[in-house]
Amino acid sequence: MDTKLSLLQTALLLLCAGAMAQENIDPSKFTGERWFGLYLNQGKVGFMQQVLSFGEGGRVLFTEEGTFRMNMSGVKQEMKVSSVRTYAHTGELISIDYTLVDLLSTTEFHAQVQDNQLKLVKKMAGQSVERYLPLPEEQLKDALKFQLWMAKKPKVGDELVSFLFEPLYEQELTCISTIIGTEERLFNGVTTKLYKIQTKVNILNLEQTSYVTEDGLVLEDIAGEIFTMRLEPKEVAQDINYSNDVLVSNAAIVDKSIPKPRDREFLKLTLTGPLKENHLFCDERQQIVTENDKFIFTAKKIHPDTIPKLTLPVQDEEVKRWAEPSSFVQSDHPEMIKTAKEIIGNTTDAWEAVQKICVWVKENMKTSYSAQLTNALDVLKHREGDCTEHSLLFVGLARAIGLPAREVAGLIYVEAPKPGFYFHQWAKVWIGKWIDVDPTFNQPLVDVTHIKIGEGDIIEQIKLIPLVGRIQITVVEE
């Protein structure tokens, strides 16, 4: 997983709202703008503006505009994300417009309620794709979650359910909020009672803690214990520089270098941090097991002579679904198919094809740190980016020739800027068995310093948010 992806996705999840009985809502009480500073592990990375306003015909518009400014290993990055959710004066959802602008591209989603269903138009990599989805349950009351809930004078232990359709995931999220306590803080010079509310998002395995006044004003949201959205005056929220290097500040720095990290036959580490059962991947290459309050990681080098013989395209029904295109991996696009076939030539041997694609991606990609929402087709066009772009392009090209492939997230050891394990993304591919491939480092078989703790698409990688910057690693002497 890339830190940049965590920032974007976490910000979008900070609006989970509370469901309640349908009632007359007077939105005029809540109009106006609010500003928030955005922090990753206490380092400031951006700001966000929220505005509730009125449009034509009494429509209610809830607008968010976020700006992220980060230093990624000395490279300054800026990314902007905006969303406008439009509701009828009676509270029903009408439309959602979502736009993300980064250094290389613009991604747009437009969701419109039509004929009791939701029409979703996605514009990405010069393509426009339409889908029709079930009508979401989201309503205006979900956007005004805490204001309406606090007016009912809830008690500790009370729960509520809310809905938020997320265009990026092309589905609706269900959020369950629980009041877990109260406390007092000094706010604007006055001692103020706050509700402490914990929210769980159904498909993301992500918890969010909110601190809310009795009037429903959100002072602070903390997602995954690492990402904070804090209410601030406009000039304070917008006061941000590029001093926070998100790559270094969230790495697991070690006290000594690892000799010959790419050539080692074996590696043993001790890990501490909030790892859960779903992070403990064990396979032919790596093992992660619990030992008291620690985790023991061991990895051994996989050699090419252990690779089984497999002919393209893969016919194994159990894994063929990973050869299908997806929203961010457009492996069925003519350019992707054409390029993949040119790379592998006449070979029908799966392992040989993997090696050729890995080498081609490494040799044809310009390596640069990039804060962007990436898709395989855009990467093929621009041929520039970091580990996220390298792995996405590899997955897209592999699927284009019938090789099942997936994205993988975890950490890898590098020497610079400081010796340590940095969050990283690579790929896995099926060639009779699953093997890990890292096109960023031109490794058809990854080295032993790759620590896999997640795999899959955006939703799966969001589940790694609570781990960013919170893993400590010690190298065990052999």
Image (cartoon, grey):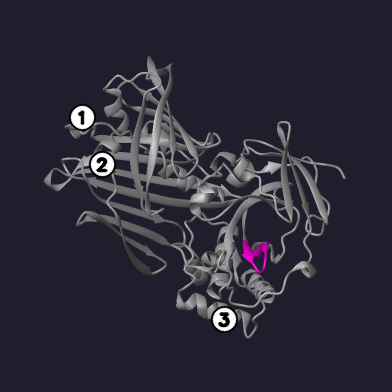
- The Cα atoms of the two marked residues, 1 and 3, are separated by 60 Å
Numbered badge on residue 139: 2
Q: Give the secondary structure at mark 3.
A: helix
User: Circle 1 is placed at which residue position?
Assistant: 29
Residue 99 occupies quadrant: bottom left
Is 430 colored magenta in this rendering?
yes
Q: Characterize the local packing of mark 2: few (<14), some (14-19) or many (20 or more) Cα atoms within 10 angstroms.
A: many
1 and 2 marks in contact (CB < 8 Å): no
Q: What residue type is labelled 3?
A: Lys
Residue furthest to the right: 478
Farthest-out residue, left: 57
Answer left or right for 209 relative to 416: left
Task: Name the residue located 37 percent from the left edge and 23 percent from the top edge.
Answer: 158
Residue at the (27%, 51%) spot, across then down: 135
Report the span colored magenta.
428-439
Residue type at the position of mark 2:
Gln
Q: Nearer the viewer, residue 395 or 378?
A: 395
Membership of 106 in magenta stretch = no
